Image: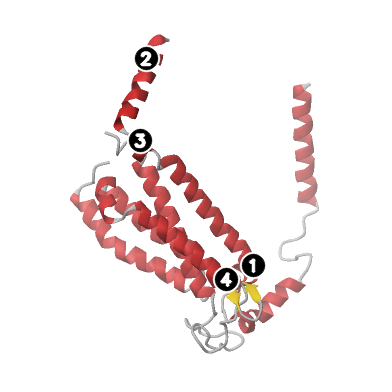
């Protein structure tokens, strides 16, 4: 039963990938042009930026960049929580945990 | 971790300033050339990684504390949010009111292909600087904590 489920899942994923690969649009021909042309034609007068990519990242879709910056902030906070703790452990507790570990190993 | 040999230390110290300057250049020229705040901050963080490997965690700690890096990270993210907020007649988010007004970063540019001027693009360069500061501090703090976590402080 379990292997049948696995094979079924694999077939569904393979079917999805094959169908999406066959029905893919040709490169350089997007579904809708209007947004591209709006950005290309209005970037310089609306944002004053020569770099249209940067204008999209920091102006038109700035909320997306704010989310990215928040992701990085959260990642650094998580690393701080995981790795910053060892610096504050007192030496006695470290020694105790080592002794407990050695006892457990000896007990086995 | 112990510090490395004097050749590595002198080379790292000599290369730190060019790397930091190149990172700042990437941040400030994001609206003219490829690059921007995220790659610029990552480039600047490589200088911190190099100094950390060359000089060791104990000596690095006296020069740059991790609380300073955490403060820089918070300043970067808060500055990004405060630059995006505009309190005018209406409160808006990510509305580029500084562009093309003639003030700070507000020089008018010609439509079409032009040589480019650093003093353009409104709040975009300031946001790049804030994001670059945040990325630099976040990557530095991750490298620093992972480097010093391997029992360097316990014994």
Label at residue A61? 1
Q: Is residue B83 left or right of residue B50?
A: right
Residue that mark 3 sits on: A89
Q: Is residue B17 left or right of residue A2?
A: left
Query: How far across and how far down the image is residue A50, in percent?
Result: 56, 79
Residue that mark 2 sits on: A103
- Residue B116, compared with residue A33, is above or below; it is below
> How crowded is the residue under tag 3: few (<14 C-alpha within 10 Å), some, or many (20+)?
few
Verify CB contact (< 8 Å) between mark 2 and mark 4. no
Query: How far across and how far down the image is residue B78, in percent?
Result: 50, 64
SS for dot 3: loop
Q: CA distance from mark 1 to mark 4?
A: 12 Å
Q: CA distance from mark 2 to mark 3?
A: 21 Å
Residue that mark 4 sits on: B84
| Location of residue A9 (image quadrant) | top right
> How crowded is the residue under tag 1: few (<14 C-alpha within 10 Å), some, or many (20+)?
few
- Which residue does the image show at 79% across and 25% down from the upper left? A4
Give the residue furthest to the top.
A107
Label at residue A82? none
SS for dot 4: helix
């Amino acid at each position: 039963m379990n292997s049948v489920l696995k094979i079924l899942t694999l077939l569904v994923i393979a079917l999805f990938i094959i169908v999406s690969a066959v029905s893919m649009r040709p490169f350089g021909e997007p579904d809708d042009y209007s947004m591209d042309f709006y950005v290309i034609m209005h970037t310089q007068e609306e944002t004053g930026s020569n770099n249209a990519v940067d204008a999209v990242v920091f102006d038109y879709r700035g909320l997306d960049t704010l989310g990215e910056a928040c992701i990085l902030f959260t990642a650094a906070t998580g690393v701080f929580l995981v790795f910053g703790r060892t610096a504050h452990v007192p030496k006695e507790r470290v020694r105790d945990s080592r002794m407990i570990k050695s006892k457990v190993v000896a007990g086995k | 971790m112990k510090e490395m040999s004097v050749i590595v230390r002198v080379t790292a110290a000599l290369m730190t300033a060019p790397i930091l300057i190149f990172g700042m250049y990437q941040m400030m020229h994001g609206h003219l050339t490829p690059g921007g705040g995220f790659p610029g901050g990552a480039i600047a963080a490589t200088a911190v990684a190099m100094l950390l490997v060359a000089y060791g965690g104990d000596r690095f700690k006296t020069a740059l504390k991790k609380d300073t890096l955490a403060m820089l990270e918070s300043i970067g993210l808060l500055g990004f949010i405060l630059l995006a907020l505009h309190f005018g007649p209406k409160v808006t988010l990510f509305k580029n009111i500084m562009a093309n007004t003639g003030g700070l970063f507000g020089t008018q540019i010609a439509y079409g292909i032009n040589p480019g001027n650093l003093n353009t693009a409104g709040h975009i360069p300031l946001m790049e600087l804030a994001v670059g500061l945040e990325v630099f501090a976040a990557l530095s703090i991750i490298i620093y904590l992972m480097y010093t976590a391997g029992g360097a402080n316990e014994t």
